[in-house]
Every structure is written in C-alpha cells, then in structure tokens.
Image: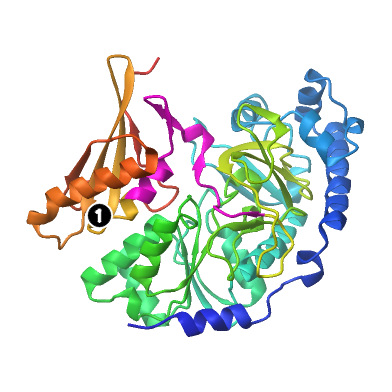
Amino acid sequence: MTDRRDEAQRRARSTRFWDEARETMPRHERDQLILERIQHQLHYVYEKLPFYRRHYDDHGFKPSDVKSLADFTAKVPVITKKMLVENQQQHPPFGDYLGVPRNQLARIHGSSGTMGKPTMYGVSRRDWGRAREASAMALWSAGVRPDDIVQITFPFALFFGGWGILQATEEIGATTFPTGSVVPTDKQIELMHTLDCDVVVGTPSYLVHLAQRSRELGLDVRDSKVSLLVAGGEPGASIASVRELLMQLWANPLIVDASAGSTSEMYPFLSNIGCTESNGGVHLFQDENYTEIVDRNDPNILVPAGTSGATVATHLWRESQPMIRFWMGDEGVIDDTPCPCGRTYPRLPRGVFGRVDDMLIIRGANVYPSAIEAAVRSVDGAGAEFRIFVERENALDELRVEVEHEPDMDTKGLEQLRLSLEAAIKLSIQIRVPVSVVAPGTHEQQTFKSRRVVDNRPKA
C-alpha cells in the first residue's frame, strides 16, 4: 500500500497561489471591488435584460438604491430556478436574460430537465474565457499542478459537469484524462492504474464506489499513484465521516471539496473550492461569484458569521445570463478567520452540508439527508449504497433507511450492523429511524449528484 503523506506535503509546499495579489488581497480592498462590480452588474441587468427590469420594478427596486454591500443584501430581491424556467418557457430558448447576441455564444449547455424541460445555458466567448482562468485559480488552490495526470469522471454532456475541470487542467498545463461518466467503472479503474493518474475528480459517492470496486477486481486504488481526490457535485467531501472513509479506501490522499456552488446557473462554479492546507471546507472566491449566507426564511437578512443559513450567489463579471442574488438552496456557515494557506477569502468550513430545499421535518426535527449519510459512512460494514424512504402514516411523516452491506460480509454480522447503523443515525439526527440491511446491488449505483431520498408521501 502506498503512503500518500510525502506527496501531500509536496503539494502543500509547492507554489501556493495562482494569482497571489488577488488571493491575498486585504478584505476591505476586496469588499470595495465587490461593491463596484455589484453596482456595475445591477445597472447592466436593469438596463439590458427585460427579465431583471420587470422583476426589480415589481419589487420597487432601482440599482441606484445600492450604496453598500449591506444595501445589496437588504434591498435586492432574489431570483429562483423556478423563475428562470418559467421565463425560458415564455421566451425560448434562453429567456430574455441572455444579454448577448446568439452569435457571441461560445457554448450552449443545459440542465437535465428535472423540473420539466431542460433549462438552457448560453455562455459568451468572453465569459467562457474568464471561466477558464477562474477555474484554473480554483483548481490550483485544490493542489493540481502541471506535472499531474488528472482523471475526470464527471459527465461531459448537456449539463456542465466536468467542463470547468477540463478548462482548468488545460490552463494549468496538467495532463487531462477526461473519461467522463460513460466509461464503465471497471475500465476507469484499469486505466487509472495503466496511466499512473495522480488526481481523480468525481463525486464522493463515485470515489467510494471506485475504491470498493477496485478491491473486488484486485486492482486496489490504494496501490495506485493517486494522491489527490477532488470531490464535488454533491455534499460529502467536508463531512468528517465521508472524508475518513475516502482516506481509508484511497490510502490517505489529499481530499479537496469542490461541491459548494456547483449549480449550472452559477458557472464557473469552481470559484468555490477547498485548499490543500485545511481539513475540508471551501474558500469563497468572493471577487468572482459573491456568496451571501442569509436567513432561510428571509433572503434579505444576512446571518452572522458562524450561523447556519442559506446560500445566495451573484456573478460579478458574467455578461451572458448573469445570476444576481440567485437562491441556491444550499446550507452553509461562513467563517472569516484566516486559513493556514494564506488566502484571505472567507470560507465555508463545513462546505455545503445539505440543501435547505431537501430538509425533512420528521417528528418536529429538521433532518438533512447528508446527516444520515454521514452516519451511514461512519459504520464499518456499510456498503456504498443506501436509500432514505419518506412515508406518511396517520398524517405523520416517518423515515426508514435501507443500507447495503459490504460484499464480503459474514451474514452472522448483519444484525449487529443494523443495530450499529440505527445507533449512529440516532446520534446524528437525534431521532430513531428503523434500518434494514440489504444485499449489495439492491439499489442503483449513484455517481453524479446523488439522489437517495425516495419520497413515498401522497402528492397533494
């Protein structure tokens, strides 16, 4: 088994910054820059984009009302995914917030259409070029260097998926191995060993699956050259139990969280990412995409540092389909204390640890699927997949959980595994949830933006 600690130290000692002046700028200087860009964007969208003019007029807001960052939070109404979808239905295909002539678009991408028709995203040539630079700065913070071979398992398809990582690795000068999500897992593992890949990019769920499947194939990832995992697309890489599991399965690599802000609307979403010198969490590159942590019930109220709230994000530079105070629905806690890496950007020390929209209220308690995942991942013998079932009994919502056991587990230990899982989940969410242990392969493998909640409640 390879020890990754020496390699981790090499990355941490190598040149820290992509753009040192920008990444270490004093906070008061950066805040002034952010305010100037916000004021520019507000005037731009009000004057040029009918979607925003109508929205702001309906709320009695004018761009000249914003004279401080506090004004921005308190006075500017948020926009939501539902509003964007409805607008594109009324003004196909891009809505009336595109902002540039169609012949200036470098890329057209789209959502998977989970809310109906896919949402279409147009990115201008200027925005695509800026995204390349911003993503490179972010991936450099994550530890990727020019001499690395980077295997990208994110999709390369309609939605943005791995495109930002691809841009970043090319800009850095690393060797890019874009396998995407269509290459079978067994082949991903075989090629990882054959090419001596240094970095693997994927969702936490898929990185767990790769490691577990590699043992079954006799090509254990612990014997590979991989020393850095960049984990995004879903919460998990800043959850202690998930990190510990990945460390165990991959022989103590560096693990960097790239999950915060990874919504297509906020492309380049790699402007929020972790660094090599902190144990989880992400830096908020606030002079690229400005992130606020607000009251979950009132997006015009900023919550204090250290207090849990909902994320709202704004493009400071994007001209094509700019998002101004976009309600992301992620939950996070902001921290302004210095990071050992020297960057002066604030951090989400726990990354995004759930979605406000995914919160379940069970017996009066707020329950996040990510908290249940953290508990499941902390128990030895639990396999890669699980499902959370939401049922309604006698007008009350109840949960039950099914967890696959590891393939080589002795059946005599299944009852103890069930009891251990129930105890871990109760400790995590403070309510008892019945657990069933099921055979490996019972549930479909989740690899990208995992959805493990099965809602069986009657639809209203």
Instruction: Name the residue: 83% across, 41% down.
Output: 69
Q: Which quadrant holds the C terminus?
A: top left
Q: Which residues are magenta?
A: 347-375
Please report the residue visible at 54 percent of the width from the left and 42 percent of the height from the top.
111
Compared across the picture, whether 251 is left or right of 341 comes to: left
Question: Where's residue 183, x and y in %?
Answer: 37, 63
Query: Is residue 26 depicted above or below 385 in this figure?
Result: below
Q: Secondary structure at mark 1?
A: strand
User: Which quadrant of the structure image shows residue 214?
Assistant: bottom left
Q: Which residue is mark 1?
A: 382
Q: Observer-nearest residue: 44 or 382?
A: 382
Name the kind of residue labelled 1 in the image.
Ala
Viewport quadrant of the N terminus: bottom left
Quadrant housing residue 77: top right
- The one nearer the camera, 315 or 2, is 2
Where is residue 105 shown, x and y percent of the image? 71, 50
